[in-house]
Image: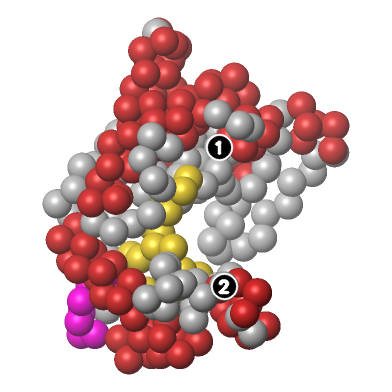
Amino acid sequence: MPLPDWDTLSLPQKIAQMVVVRASGHLFDPQIEYPDWEPPTALLQHWLEDLGIGGVLLLGGTAAEVGLRSQQLQDWAAIPLLIAADIEEGVGQRFAGATRLPPPMALSAIARQDLTRAIALAEKMGEITAQEAIAIGLNWVLAPVVDINNNPENPVINIRAWGETVEDVCQLTTAFIQGAQRHPVLTTAKHFPGHGDTAIDSHLDLPMIPHDLARLNAVELKPFVAAIAPK
C-alpha cells in the first residue's frame, strides 16, 4: 500500500504523527505492568489505526515478545511507526533474552587507562545495541546519555553517564552513535544540557540549574553539539 503524502494529511493527522505514546512490550493486557501509563490493546490499536499516532515507546516483555509486538504495531499503522526503547545499556537492559551491556561509566573508567580502547568499545556497544534493536523491531534507540556526571550528589544520571569531563563524554558518545548508525536506527542524545549537574531526580521534581549561558556553552552543551555534528 503506498504511503500517504505528508501534504495530503489533515492537521490532526500531522499532529498525531508527532506524538509518541508509551505502551507495554507484553502481548496481552493482563501482563501490563503499569496500567496508569500503558494503554490496553484496544485503545492502543485505536490510537494507531484511527488517529495515526506516529510512535510507540515500549517497556517490559522479553525480546521475543517485543519482536512480535513491534510487528503487531506496524501492522496497525498506515504510516510506518517509530518504535523506541530506553536501551542505554543494550537491548537486554529492558528486554530479557537480549544482551545486557555494561553501564556507560565503565567505559569512562577504561578511558582513563586506554582512551583508544574505550572509544573502540563504545563504538562496538553502539553497533551491538543497534543490531539487536533492529532484530526485535525497534528503530529508535533512546541513547546515549550525553549528560556530564559532574555532580556527585546526582541521584539519577551517575553511572548512566559516559564520564565526568567534557572530553570523555564527547568522544565516547560520538563513538557510540557512529557504531549505532552503521545500521538503520535513530539515536538520541539525552537528556538536557545540565542534567548531570543536578541533585534532584527529575522523575520526581523539577531540578534548577544555576548556570549562566557562558558556562552551558563551555561545558554542558558541548556533548550535544558533538552528538548532532555530521558524522
Up the image or down, 128 lies above or below 39; here it is: above
**In terms of image quadrants, where is residue 18?**
bottom right
Q: Is residue 182 visible?
A: yes
Which quadrant, please, contains the C terminus? Answer: top right
**Mark 2: which secondary structure?**
loop
- Write down the residue under mark 1: 146
Give neighbour class at mark 1: few <14, some 14-19, many 20+ (Cα, 10 Å).
Answer: many
Residue 30 image offset from top left, x and y in percent: 20, 85
Rendered location of residue 64, percent (x, y): 15, 61
Residue 162 among those drawn in magenta: no
In this picture, residue 68 sits left or right of residue 81: left
Residue nearest the viewer, comparing 188 with 101: 188
* Amino acid at circle 2: Asp
Q: Residue at x 57, y 78 (%)?
A: 16
Magenta stretch containing residue 28, yes or no? Answer: yes
Residue 226: x, y in percent? 62, 30
At horizontal 73% and vertical 52% (from top left) the residue drawn is 208
Q: What residue range appears in magenta?
A: 24-31
Mark 2–mark 1 Cα distance, whole angstroms, equals 35 Å
Which residue is located at x 29 percent, y 59 percent?
A: 137
Q: What residue type is disc 1 on?
A: Val
The answer to whether the residue labelled 2 contacts the one labelled 1, judged by CB atoms less than 8 Å apart, is no
Residue 196 screen position, x and y as percent: 60, 40
At 60% from the left and 72% from the top, the residue drawn is: 6
Is residue 128 positioned above or below 27 on the image? above
Report the disc number at residue 5. Answer: 2
* Residue 224 sits above or below residue 28 on the image: above
